Each structure stands twice: as C-alpha cells, then as structure tokens.
Image (cartoon, rainbow, N blue to C red):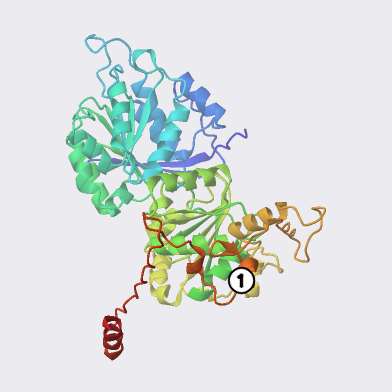
Amino acid sequence: MPTRKARALSKITIDHEDDASETTLSAQLDTTHTAPSFAELGVRDEIVRALAELGIERTFAIQELTLPLALAGDDLIGQARTGMGKTFGFGVPLLHRISSATGSPDDADVDARPGTAPLDGTPRALVIVPTRELCIQVTEDLVNAGKYLPGSNGRKLSVLSIYGGRPYETQIEALQRGVDVIVGTPGRLLDLAKQGHLILGKVGVLVLDEADEMLDLGFLPDIERILQMVPDARQTMLFSATMPGPIITLARTFLTQPTHIRAEEPESSAVHDRTSQHIYRAHALDKAEMVARILQAEGRGATMIFTRTKRTAQKVADELNERGFSVGAVHGDLGQIAREKALKAFRTGKVDVLVATDVAARGIDIDDVTHVVNYQCPEDEKTYVHRIGRTGRAGRTGTAVTLVDWDDVPRWQLIDKALDLGVPDPVETYSSSEHLYAELNIPTDAKGTVRKPRTERAQNVSTEDAPAAGDGTAASEGGAAERPRRTRTRKRTRGGRTAEAASTAPADTSSEAVAPEPTSPSGDAAPARRRRRRRRSSGGAGADATTAAASE
C-alpha cells in the first residue's frame, strides 16, 4: 500500500490576548519542513502499527499541531478544511489516552488527568457527529487505528456506533456487553441516555466532530443536554471546517481555556487548490445530458453528484441508470439499510457514481473520488466547500463541476463573492458546447447513453440463453435465439364432448337431452322438471311484460 506523502509546516503563529479565553495557533504549509511521524510524537506502538498498515506514517498539519496538546489532555478547537485529516487528529489521541491507563480506579498513583481511568466496560470516550454516514465512517477509522489496543476484561478495545434507523435492541445488547468508545448522533445518544442504557458518567474524552453541521441541522439543544450528562473533569475537543459564531460561543461555554488550531496553506482559500473548479450556467432540461457526458470524461474514477432535494436525487439516479451508468443513491427517503448498501457499493467499486443530498456530503471519506458534480447550486458557501471537499483528498487532485440554473445565479454570486472564486457570471453551456468537452477532457464522440439499462440487459441475457428451435443454435435477425415450438396439443370441449363431436351432432339436439331422464321410485318415468326462466334485474316495461308472461 502506498505511503502518504507528508506536508510541511513553515509558519506557525500563536495569538493570545490577556482578556481572551482561548489561544489561537495557526500554521501554514510549504516544502521546508518535514512532518514528524506518529511514533516521534509519542503515540502508542499499537496505534502506529495499525496506521502503518493503512499506509499512514507521517502526520498532516492539523494532526501535527493537535497531537502534542491532545495527548497532554488539553482542550482544543481544531479547524482545517475537509480532507485534511481531522478524524485522526482527534482519534489517535483519544485512543492513546483511554488505553494508556494502568492500575485500578482505587489506586492513588493513577494519573489524575481526565480520560485516563482504567477501562471497565463503560464508555470512556464519546464522539458526537451530525450524520449517520459520518458516524459509520468515524467508527471504521477508530476501529482500524485501535485494532491492536487492549480493552476491558482482557478483550480488544471496543468501539460502537449508535445512530438512528437501526433497532434499539442490538445497540442496547452491545452496551450491556461493554463498550470503551462511543460514536453516535445526538438524537439516538440522548434517547439511550434517558432510558438508562447509555452511561455517560465516566466519559473522560469528549469530541464534537463537524460542529458547524450539527448547528445547521438544529442539534445544538441536544448537544447541550448531552454535555450536561458527562463529568466536568473531562477533555473536550471540537473539530470543524468552519467556525460560525454560535460554535465559538458553545466552545467558550463548555471548553476550558481551549487552544484554537488552524492549519492552512500559503495564501490558501476555503477550498482545495488541488481541485480544479468549473462553473457552468446550464438549463434544467439539459443537465442530465451534460452529466452523462461529464461521466465519460477521460480519467474519471469514482464520482459524486449532489442535489438539494431528495426527490431530485432519486430522479437523477434513475435517469442515469436508464442511460447505462452504474449509479447508487443516498438520501433521506431511503431506509438506513438501503443507504448503507449504496455507500458500501460505492466504496467497494460496484457502482462508480453516487447521487446524494447535502447530508451525505459529511462522512463519505473516499480518497479516490476524482469528480464532484453539483447538479444543483449549493445553498451557501459552506455547503459548496463541503461538497467539493469530497475530491482532492489526502494530497490527490480532483475536478469539481457546478451547474447553475438561471434562477440560481443570484445565489451563486453570493457564494462566489464569499469564496472569492472570480466567476460571478458562469458561461452559458449546453451538452453540445465545445468548451465543455475541451475543459473536462470529454471525448468528442461521447453520447448521452453508454449502454442499455440494467433491466433491458438482464432481459436480453435471459433471451440469449434460451435454446433456439431445431438444433438450438440458430439465432433470429435481432441476435436473440428463438423459442422452441411447443409440442403440447389442446382439445376444445363443449358439453363434455370434443368440439368435432359436438359439430357433427344433430342440430335439434341440445345439451340438456344428453342427460338421462330421472325416474321415480316405482320405475315410471318422472315428469320433466320445468326450467325456470331467469328474471331480468332491470325495471321498465320490458321487465313487466316478462313477468306477466311468466305468470301466465
């Protein structure tokens, strides 16, 4: 597995005012400084070994700055753009601290710093994330990094993800067996804590990941309730790509003299410089054709397409599937199992296009995403940053394409002004525009479809597999084999006899005469039973005449 290249630090700025409650630490990247390895920063050997198996040996800027403070138990605020390694920035010190305690809780020489009490099966660390997808991703990262760490009762370190859309019983049983680290969404965490199944009284390390997204989703009241359930003597780390005012207020309320860490590149903007951005003004009826051609660009790998609404996400996924692309969808109208299956298929490469809403933009950490397409204009600059942050991760390059409808031009101009992108008026572009093909390296012979949809392909395959008539090898002009002619013969009957026999019978012979006349017990022929005439249900003169005739 290739080893990740280390980025360098050239400028570190420390800003601390006497009347301020936090210290600001900023760093910029260049090529004059070699980042240290995790082992050089004092991380446990088990964690270093697990990270090395993942191809990670040296730190990113945010990790290099946070690890010394986080390993010491200090509160901090980590701010870096998406894809800069924030997860291991808090995950590595979290695993290191909760697994480094020795002795028993009653020993006097146990380290008094929060988060270092010995493990006993109750949660020692809590990570709060805004979305289910991010919860799954963070849990996988912590499991991979801590797979060699010892846990409680002679077991390996246990990490549990708790989020909605899954049965309560499974999560409650896991908590009863014993868990060392909890990663969860605010709603389900609060429910289990109120029911008494989740014990937060021994949490020593608390992490708020993507705090600005939790603010946007309205989780701030739930977070405040959870923070009131954890002990005051704890280490708290807050990580996010942006820091709006309410998040700063939350940090100053629940963090103790935190250090604000910002990792930046020289003259950096809010987006990755390694991501080439293309903005086009597109018509709503032509977007599907444009996306179909973008997906045929040279060098395209895994691609994510973002929409604003759930209905649009499913509509785009269905249309691209009809055009022959391997597409998955992730949005709120899908069940949790369906969403996880789609994400798993995208990670494993079974599908190379994923259509998702903005909620899924947080938590999908796939390094080889080459293209991101904004099918609809983002709501604001933060959403734009997080959308295109799915590509160009971990030192790789990427391409971001934004399709702006005529009605969304004012919204895009606000985003452009906030991020200083220099494209206030996108060029009008259609699926046949030459500059679209030239800028995105699309072959000139690219069409709107690549192959038949999956359903039609399956039908064709089943038809081709069927044996043909005669020798079973002849094929029809359409390419599909003909069905063998059936050898079964059918006989049509009438009144219990075949149609041929019924046609040769005398014309005055009716089916009623076929049955023998009933006889009386004395042997004499019984009088024939008079056939009842069926009355019509409709009223009127015709019905009255029929009734009169019957009575006569």
* Crowd band around label 1 with a 10 angstrom C-alpha radius: few (<14), some (14–19), many (20+): few
Looking at the rendering, in which quadrant would you find the N terminus?
top right
The outermost residue toward the bottom is: 541
**Where in the figure is residue 145, as x and y percent of width and height?**
46, 28
* In this rendering, position of residue 349 left or right of residue 270: right
SS category of the residue bearing label 1: loop
Which residue is depicted at the point 30% across and 16% down? Answer: 118
**Where in the figure is residue 377, as x and y percent of width and height?**
43, 66
Amino acid bearing label 1: Ala
One can see residue 287 in this view: yes
Q: Can you say whether 161 is above or below 462 in the image?
A: above
Q: Nearer the viewer, residue 397 or 141?
A: 141
**Where in the figure is residue 23, as x and y percent of width and height?**
29, 40
Quadrant in which residue 449 is drawn: bottom right
One can see residue 65 in this view: no
**Where in the figure is residue 5, as x and y percent of width and height?**
58, 37
Which residue is depicted at the point 24% across and 13% down? Answer: 105
Q: Can you say whether 39 is above or below 364 in the image?
A: above
* In this rendering, position of residue 32 left or right of residue 85: right
**Residue beneath label 1, please?**
505
Total numbered circles: 1
